[in-house]
Image (cartoon, helix red, strand yellow):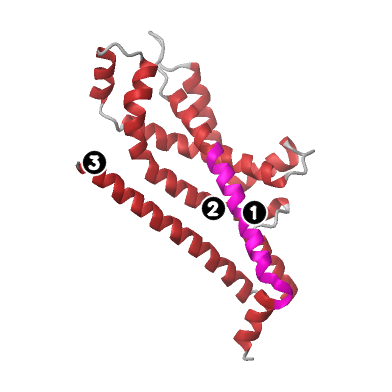
């Protein structure tokens, strides 16, 4: 065996270490998927709060204020700091690291998703809303039946990009002792006293996952463009 083969063997084959990478990838994807769902739910709520109509004589609603403060705080502080606060302060008595990390990343993602959804809704021509109201629909019905279906086409690609970003951001969960893909690579590196092969291996796995998702996202964008031209 040459040197590269030996390093590869030690990093992936010895003691079935390749299984550890895929277990770590499973933790990474589990957190990302749960956080993504939480982020979309929070993002929808916050976006609608920021779009709430003020009462006559008022500049903004209380909902707009709450949503704006939330977005400013989340976007103005590091994700790793938010994770540490959730783990060591908010959920200090919890032993479920995956759940805590998912909530932390979901809350973080919700701030960004809310801006994506808000921009998507605002991109729909105002005449669509006026047409719905002229037909006798309430503001809620107009939003649900006319505006949101059109806004979905605008927000799906950027939300897909946000999910890709979320997968990479989960690499910091090692701070709360979760064995995700990055932490597994670091642990194997410390056991083999060789950093190159374990870390490059993890990087390749990340790249393949992100590349597949990127291709799927591009296919979705092409399909949406075709539907717009009909």
Mark 2 vs mark 3: in front: 3
23 inside magenta stretch:
yes
Q: Is residue 195 above or below residue 214?
A: below
Residues drawn in magenta:
14-38
Between residue 33 and residue 171, name the one nearer to us. Answer: 33
Q: Which mark is residue 167?
A: 2
Q: How many marks?
A: 3
Quick one: SS at disc 2?
helix
**Which residue lies at the image location 38% right of the left edge and 39% below the top edge?**
155
**Which residue lies at the image location 53% right of the left edge and 43% below the top edge?**
36
Percent position of residue 48, x then y = 44, 25
Percent position of residue 115, x then y = 43, 35
Quick one: SS at disc 1?
helix
**Which secondary structure class fits the magenta region best?**
helix
Which residue in the structure is indicated by mark 3? 228
Residue 75 in sight from this viewpoint: no
């Amino acid at each position: 065996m040459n040197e590269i083969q030996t390093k590869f063997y030690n990093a992936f084959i010895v003691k079935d270490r390749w299984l550890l990478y895929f277990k770590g990838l499973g933790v990474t994807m589990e957190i990302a998927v749960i956080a993504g769902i939480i982020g979309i739910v929070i993002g929808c709520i916050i976006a609608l709060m920021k779009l709430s109509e003020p009462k006559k004589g008022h500049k903004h609603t209380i909902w707009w204020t709450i949503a704006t403060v939330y977005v400013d705080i989340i976007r103005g502080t590091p994700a790793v700091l938010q994770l540490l606060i959730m783990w060591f302060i908010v959920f200090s008595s919890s032993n479920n690291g995956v759940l805590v990390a998912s909530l932390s990343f979901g809350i973080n993602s919700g701030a960004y998703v809310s801006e994506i959804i808000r921009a998507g809704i605002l991109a729909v021509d105002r005449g669509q809303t006026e047409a719905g109201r002229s037909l006798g629909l309430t503001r809620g019905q107009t939003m649900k039946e006319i505006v949101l279906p059109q806004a979905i086409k605008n927000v799906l690609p950027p939300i897909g990009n946000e999910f890709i970003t979320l997968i990479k951001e989960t690499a910091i969960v090692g701070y709360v002792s979760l064995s995700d893909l990055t932490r597994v690579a670091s642990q194997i590196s410390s056991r083999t006293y060789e950093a190159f092969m374990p870390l490059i291996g993890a990087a390749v796995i990340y790249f393949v996952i992100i590349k597949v998702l990127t291709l799927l996202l591009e296919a979705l964008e092409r399909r949406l463009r075709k539907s717009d031209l009909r």
